[in-house]
Structure formats: C-alpha cells, structure tokens
Amino acid sequence: MSPQKTQARGIQKFYRETIAELRKVTWPTKDEAINLTRVVLIVIFLMGAFLGILDYLFTRLFGLILGA
C-alpha cells in the first residue's frame, strides 16, 4: 500500500474517532451555558480588580522605597 493511501486512511480514522467521541459528550443546556458564562465573567472581573489593586499598591510601595 502506498504511503498516501496509508495517510488518507489514518486521517479518515482520526475523523471517525473524533466524531464518535463528540457524540459521547454531555453538552450543557442553554441555561447551564449562560450561568457558567456569568460565573466566568464575574471571576474575571474580580481577579482583574484584585490584580489592579495589587499593582497600584506595589507601584506606590516601590515609589516610596525608591523615593520617586
């Protein structure tokens, strides 16, 4: 068998197995997806605020230490 046919069969097998695995997935409902999206956005906002505050505090601290 030529290498091209072997490669083509390997690609076909990959796609068949991928589709089979995707059929096994338990997909979230629309409400679950919306709720999880809200949770992610809230966590991102809170972490951004927390890191922003830390950045501000460390900037002020190093400004005091370095006398700037």
Image (tube, rainbow, N blue to C red):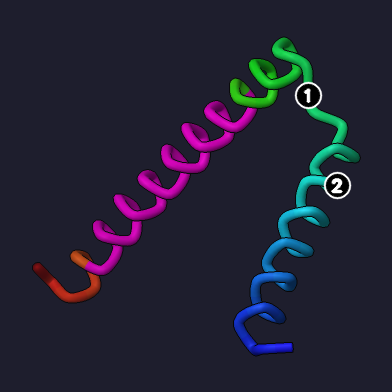
> From the viewer's perspective, is 51 left or right of 42?
left
Residue at mark 1 to residue at mark 2: CA–CA distance: 18 Å
Q: What amino acid type is highlighted by mark number 1? A: Pro
Q: Decide if residue 9 is on the left or right side of residue 34.
A: right
In the foreground, 54 or 18? 18
Which of pointers 1 and 2 indicates the residue nearer the eye? 2
Q: Which mark is residue 20?
A: 2
In the picture, the quarter occupied by the C terminus is bottom left
Give the vertical position of 18 relative to 5 (above or below): above
x and y, in percent, of residue 25 in the image: 85, 38
Kindly indicate the quadrant of the structure image that contains residue 64. bottom left
Give the extent of the magenta segment: 39-62
Question: Any magenta on residue 47?
Answer: yes
Location of residue 43 by image quarter = top right
Residue at the image point whose x is 69% and y is 21% from the top:
33
Residue nearer the viewer, 25 or 19: 19
Instruction: Give the SS element for disc 1.
Output: loop
Residue at point 67%, 78% (across, down): 5
Q: Disc 1 designates what residue? A: 28
Location of residue 49 in the rendering, given as x and y in whole percent from the top left corner? 42, 38
